[in-house]
Amino acid sequence: MHILIIGAGYAGLRTAIELDRRRAAYGEQLEVTLLDQHPYHQLVQELHLAATTAPDPTNVIVPLQTIFQRRAVQVYQGRVQRIEPLARRVRLADGRSLSYDRLLLALGAETNYAHVPGAPQHTLPLRSYEQALRLRDHIAACVEAAARTTDPRLRRILLTFVIVGGGYTGCQVAGELVPHVSTLAATAGIARNELRIALIERNGLLLKQAEPWANAYAQRVFDDLGVRVYLHTTVARVAEQALYTTTNQVFRAGTIIWAAGIRAPALLADSGLATDALGRVRVDRYLRVEEQALIFAAGDCASIPATVDGPIPATASYALRQGEHLAGALLADVQGQAPQPYTPLRLREVVSLGPGAAVGNPLGIPLTGIPAALLKQGIETWYRSTLL
């Protein structure tokens, strides 16, 4: 029996690790293959650090070879070109193909530009390690260019940074961007008051899934950091070094970071699978893809039925638990047993807002500031320990 997992993100990686851990108890001859386009697992929850304050950006990736060197999981590197459910086969861009008895789709997500003109060409996304490095280099180049130019208008543009989208990514980037560019500016001989950082959110809350008190705290933190927050502000179009809103506001900025949403890869719809408006493959309460008895899906690429608490958030915490659930479900399925339905727990998140600042409500206990920041660091440290 061959289980093929596409995607070494939080959901796919956790499924592979759990399958290896549990297989001995089932006594089933089982082959597990993990396929990803990269030779590493990227810690998406920490990409904002790689793009800004992390002394060593490579700390946000962990080689798959290191993770699976003592585990009975085959690791393949390749980019999927097409999924062929009828043939039970996955075709890769380099001409290779992999067959399967059961398939898990854990492809993650990519940036959703929401059809905003100019956004793909003139903004910097933050969904991958490569994008984090590109953003880091771009920020440094802007500060260096500002220090060299004698044109005051260009200097102002180069020292203006705009983040589109609140949420976890936008808020975490904003919190780390302030100390990062401040350090770069001081090194280049630029005064701190020349830096301008704006955070734009089309809704009335920066953190839609957080309580009002958490949003109020985040707003206070950004006020203290000097980040200008613009709520109820929708981007109409983006040009080179310019962002235009539907209310005719114009932001001239050398750096425009796009953190305004995600969507699933087009590969899923192109392969004939049932998808929703964001390209996510539709699954039932067992995380089985609609109309596909042998294909399951989890994480950001899966459209999971909402519960009484609302839609399932696209966060690492939920993806990890989906991976753990699917390991058991897949093992039960290959033995002809009825899998248990996926029942999500209501999870509370902790969001970083910069060095020494975070906000969250873990276990129903409101936390802010240094205690929340230490908890956030502890969670990331714990997660890393589970990989080895």
Image (spheres, rainbow, N blue to C red):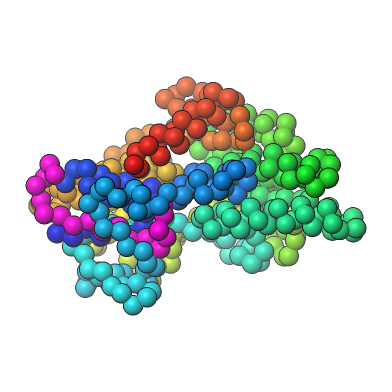
Q: Give how far across and how far down residue 23 sits, in percent.
A: 16, 46
Q: Give how far across and how far down residue 88 sits, in percent.
A: 22, 69
Q: Is residue 29 magenta?
A: yes
Relative horizontal placement of residue 138, taking residue 186 as reference (left or right): left
Occupied quadrant, residue 98: bottom left
Work out whether 77 lies above or below 355: below
Number of labelled discs?
0
Q: Give how far across and how far down residue 383 sits, in percent.
A: 40, 38
Write the residue at 57% across / 60% down.
113
129 or 220: nearer the viewer? 129
Q: Is residue 314 magenta?
A: no
Write the residue at 65% across / 60% down.
123
Is residue 12 visible in the rendered structure shown here? yes
Is residue 158 visible in the rendered structure shown here? no
344 or 121: nearer the viewer? 121
Q: Which residues are magenta?
A: 24-41
Relative horizontal placement of residue 168, taking residue 305 as reference (left or right): right
Occupied quadrant, residue 316: top left
Write the residue at 35% across / 53% down.
65
25 or 296: nearer the viewer? 25
Name the quadrant of the N terminus: bottom left
Occupied quadrant, residue 248: bottom right
Q: Give how far across and how far down residue 104 sits, in percent.
A: 28, 57
181 or 215: nearer the viewer? 181
Tell which residue pokes out farthest to the bottom in this image.
95
Name the quadrant of the C terminus: top left
